[in-house]
Structure formats: structure tokens, C-alpha cells
Image (cartoon, coloured by chain):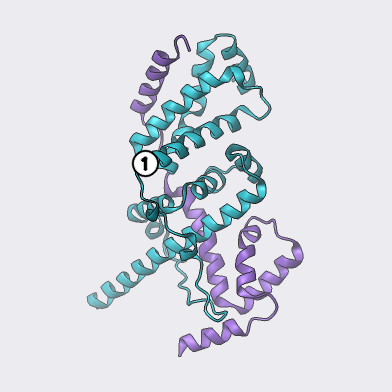
Chain colours: A purple, B cyan
Amino acid sequence: MEKDEKTTQVFACKGMKCKEMLEKLSEYIDGELDPKLCEDLEKHMADCNPCLIFVNTLKKTISLFKYASSEPLPKEVHLRLHDYLKKNCQGC
Amino acid sequence: MDLSDQVLVDKVKNGDYQAFESLVTRYESKVYRLSIRMLRSPQDAEDALQETFIQVYRGLSGFEGRSAFSTWLFRLATNVCLMKIRHRATEPSRLLPLEDYLPRQEQGEIPQMVDWTDRPEEALLSKESREKMMEALEKLPPEYRAVFVLRDMEGFSNAETGEALGISVAAVKSRLHRARLALRGMLSDYFERRGEIRVRESSLEA
């Protein structure tokens, strides 16, 4: 039953289609989209819950990856690097 | 006062090895982080780090300063990582086609979506989730991974990313978009599965 409601919701979207919207999402997230298209896209999202969730999960994905790995340089890797360079850069 | 990159570069060109060490110290953490993100393996990342700075030292005499030193350095580092990936004995089939992670549209319909964004940060950024993210990143074809790492993880602009990879801004945008969609797809699959497990566990407890 719930699926039928959502399907109807998608088909009820006016103006911009879901696929057109998907193509523009990165530009939208990066604030590079033409203001008119931006407005169309926001109107579309107001009517289309799957697209709204798609945008939210896309934004969250980008922000999570910023924290996915920020490993500090291990001290021993730093020491080995400087040693290696000293040995190998002589007479370069 | 810290000397600018350009002043240090000029000193290295005049044979000042200390100045080279200062440049290495300034950038080694960033190059290591980029390498880990590109290669995942700490051993490969360390090799890439050493190789990059050797190439920097050897190439500095030819560096004319048309781009910033840091852009040139990251271009070298990214290329070293891409070469390492190409030399891995990876079967091409291991690289998943990006189309798999675009929402499948049948008759104009977008499939049902699960919104996992409101889950607590500790679940979204658990050790397991972070492992999954690095796995997902590794599944991206290297050229897409490089764009995503530089642009979204390292915070380069489109122009800087293009310069570092030797591609146009339009190509950066197109690869970035596809990489983001693919990663979103992989992460959503994972969080949706985690959500189902959580629901099953809580119903068992109840």
C-alpha cells in the first residue's frame, strides 16, 4: 500500500523530472546551479519524497567521507621518509 | 616567520638541502593522507610518500612555478598513486560499473529510498562504517577516486583538482558527480542493511 502511495507521488511530480534532477544534484549541492534551475529543483523535491531522500543521503555521504579517514602521519613513517630522502637525494 | 614555498623552492634549487627538508615537513602529512585515501594500504601509502618526494627533489630544477608548488606536488603524488594502482594485479572485473549505483529507473519511477541520515553520528561514523567507506572508495575506478579524494576529501577547488590531474573542469565535475552517486549508492546499501539488522535485533529483544 505504502509503495503505491510513493509511486503515485513520483508520477505526480510536475515540471522537472527525477532523472533531470539527478543530473544536476552535484551542481546544486555545490551551489553552482543557475538560480532558476535551483528553484525548479527545490519545487520538485517538495513534491517528490524519494528525490528529497536521495539529496539528503548524497549530502550526508559527502560529509561523512570527510571524516572517513584522516590518519595522522605515524612518527616512524616520518622518520623513515627523512632517512630515505637523505640517503637517496645525495648526488641527485 | 615561515618562508613561503617559492622561497624554499628557490633555496633548494641553489643546493640548500635543509630547505628541501622544510618543504617535506610542511607537506608530508597531507601527501600521506592523500596516499592512504587513494591506496588504503599503509605500506603502499608509505612507498608512495617516499616516491613522491624523490620525484619532487629530482624534478624541482625543471619546476618553473607556472602553477603553485603545492598543486605541482599533489599532481605528482596523485600520479604516483595512480601508477601504483595500475601496477596492482587487479582484475578489471573488480571495478564495479558506476551505473550499478545510479538509481534504477523503471518506467520513470525512482525506487524506494531509505533515509538513514538521521541515525546517530556514532553509528554513521563507527569503526565498521568507516571501514565500509574506505572499501567503497576503493571500488571506484581510480580516475574517479582521485577526483573525489582531491575535491571532496582534501578540499581542492574544481580548478585545482583539474590542474592536479591534468583534466578540464568539466571533466572534474562529471567524474565527481558520478563518484558521489556511486559512493552514495554503496553507503546506502550498507546503512539500509545495518538498519534491517538493527530492527531484527530489537524485535528479538522485545
Image quarter hosting the C terminus of chain B: bottom left
Q: Residue furthest bottom?
A: A1
| Residue B100 makes an appearance in the image | yes
Disc 1, SS: loop
Q: Nearer the viewer, residue B167 or B66?
A: B167
Look at the picture and state if A70 lies above or below B121: above
**Residue at screen point 55% across, 58% down:** B178
* Coordinates of residue B31 in the picture (x, y in percent): 48, 33
Between B4 and B133, the residue placed more toward the observer is B133
Q: Position of residue B176 (x, y in %)?
A: 57, 53
In the rendered image, which residue does mark 1 sit on? B88
Residue drawn at (50%, 36%), measured in percent from left and top? B79
Is residue B1 shown to the viewer in this render? no
Of residues A72 and B165, the one nearer the viewer is B165
Question: Above or below — where is B138 with respect to B68?
Answer: below
Three-letter amino acid code of the residue under disc 1? Arg
